[in-house]
Image (tube, grey):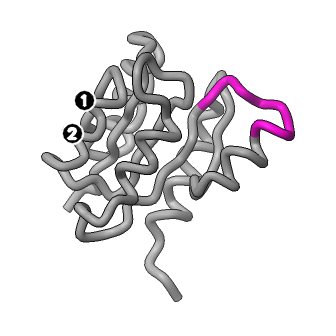
Amino acid sequence: MPRRILVVEDDEKSRRLLVDVLGYHGYEVAAAENGESGVASAIACAPHVALLDIQLPGMSGFEVLAQLRDAAFEQRIPAIAVTASVMDQDRRRILAAGFDAYVGKPVNIRQLLDTLEKLLAPAP
C-alpha cells in the first residue's frame, strides 16, 4: 500500500513539482494550496506525512501544524517544513514549534526523499 503524503504549498509550480516527484517515487499524494484546505485534506486523506510550506496565505504552516496535532486526529501526523526561510534561527524556530524535520527551498529532492524515508521507517 503506498504511503500518503499531503503537500500544502501555495506556489503552484513548487506544489506541482513536489506532487510529480513524490508520485514518481511511489507515494500517493494529496495537495492543497492553502492552510485551510490543507487541514481539510488531512482529515479526508489521513496522510502518513505532511509537507507544509511555512509562508502560506491566511493560515500559516505553524497554524496548520497546530491543527494537525489537535486531538481530532487519531494518529500524530509527522510534518516536514518546506520553506525558503533557511537561516539558522528560522530552522531552530521551526523545529521548536514541533515540526519533525525541515527542508529548505529550493528543495533538494534527495534530501526530501531521505527525510521522508526516515519519518516513515518503522520504529525499531
Query: Is 20 in front, or is 12?
Result: 12
Query: Is 99 in front, or is 45?
Result: 99
Q: Which residue is mark 1?
A: 37
Residue range in magenta is: 83-90
Whole-percent x, y for residue 79 in the image:
48, 51
Q: Badge 1: how crowded within 10 Å, few (<14), some, or many (20+)?
A: some
Q: Amino acid at mark 2?
A: Ser
Is there any visible trace of residue 65 in the rendered image? yes
Residue 90 is left or right of residue 8, and the answer is right
Q: Is residue 99 magenta?
A: no
Residue at position x 67%, y 45% in the image:
94
Residue 103 is left or right of residue 79, and the answer is right
Residue at position x 57%, y 34% in the image:
82
Say if mark 2 contacts mark 1, CB within 8 Å: yes
Q: Amino acid at mark 1?
A: Ser
Whole-percent x, y for residue 11 in the image:
45, 13
- Judged from this view, the residue extending furthest toward the right is 88
Is there any visible trace of residue 31 in the rendered image? no
Question: Quick one: quadrant of the N terminus?
Answer: bottom left
121 lies above or below 54: below
Whole-percent x, y for residue 40 in the image:
20, 39
Q: Is residue 86 magenta?
A: yes
Residue at position x 50%, y 60% in the image:
117
Q: Which residue is mark 2?
A: 41
Query: Is 58 in front, or is 33?
Result: 58
Whole-percent x, y for residue 96 in the image:
69, 55
100 lies above or below 13: below
Residue 45 is left or right of residue 21, and the answer is left
Residue 16 is left or right of residue 72, and the answer is right
41 lies above or below 60: below
